[in-house]
Amino acid sequence: MKKKDKYLEIMLETACAEYGSALEMLAACKLSNKSNFAYGYFHHSKDEYNHTKSFKKLLGKTGESIHPKIAKKYKFNSIYLINKGYVSEEGYLIETMKLKDFIAYVYTNELLAKDSFAKILDLFKTNTSDSKVISSIMKDELRHHGFSEKHFLKYYPRLQPWQLKFYRMRETLKNKTRKLYDKNIKFLDKVLTPVYFFMAYLAAKIVSIINLKEFQRKGNNLMEIRSKSIL
C-alpha cells in the first residue's frame, strides 16, 4: 500500500472510531438517570464529535490533492460505523452492557485511543497545525480516561487493578479482531468482484442467444401455442 493510501486509511478509520464513540456517549447521556452522569457523557460526546470533524478535515485536505477516484474510496460515510463494527446493529453499548462494564469500556478505550494517536502523530511533522490538532485530541482522550478512572474509584471501590487490566486486554483483542475482519472483507471483495462481473457477462451472453420470438404473443391466438412452449 502506498504511503498516502495508508495515511488516508488511518484518517478514515480514526474518524469512524471517533464518530462511533460520540454516538455511544450521546446514547449514554440520553439514558442516564443522574444529571452529573448525563453532563459528563454529553461533554464527552461533544469532544468526540469535534475529533471526528478534525479527522474529516484532514481527510478532505489530502483528498483535494489526489485523483478523485482514489479520494472517493476514502470518503467518510456514516454507514461505515456499522460495516466496520464501530457501532453494533444490536444496539448501543449502554443498552447492552452493565453500567460497570460500560465504564470499563470507556476507561480502557480512551487509553487505547491515546496510544493510537501517539502513532498517528508520527505521520506529521512536528510543530505543524495538523500535529497540534492531534496533540490536542490526545489530551482530550487522557482527560476522558482520567474521568473514567475517578468514576471507578468512587462508584466501584472494590474493583481490583487486575480487573481493569483484563478489560483493557479484552478491548485490545476485540479491536485487533475487528481490523482483521475488515481486511478479510476487503480481500474477499477484490477476489469475488471479478467473479460477479464474469457471471453477469455470461448471463448476458446466454440471454443474447435465446430466441425471444417465443415471448411475442401480441396478435397471436394463445390457444394455438405449442404444448412444449415456455409460456
Image: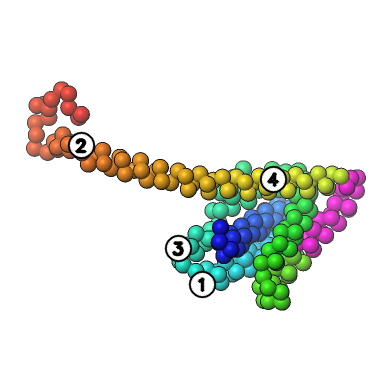
Q: CA distance from mark 4 to mark 3?
A: 32 Å
Q: Work out which quarter of the rendered image holds the N terminus and state it.
A: bottom right
Could you tell me which secondary element the residue under label 3 belongs to? helix
Left or right relative to 229: residue 25: right
Res 179 visible:
yes
> Decide: marks 1, 2 in contact (CB < 8 A)?
no
Point out the stretch of residues depicted in magenta. Answer: 141-161
Res 12 visible:
no
Q: Is residue 59 above or below residue 35?
A: below
Magenta stretch, main secondary structure class: helix
Label 1 neighbour load within 10 Å: few <14, some 14-19, many 20+: few
Decide which of 27, 181 is in the foreground and name it: 181
Q: CA distance from mark 1 to mark 4?
A: 35 Å
For disc 4, the marked residue is 174
Q: Is residue 191 above or below residue 117?
A: above
- Type of amino acid under label 3: Lys
Q: Position of residue 44 (x, y in %)?
A: 73, 61
Answer with mark 4 or mark 3, whichever residue precedes in sequence: 3
Disc assigned to residue 69: 3
Decide which of 137, 195 is in the foreground and name it: 195
Q: Work out which quarter of the rendered image holds the C terminus and state it.
A: top left
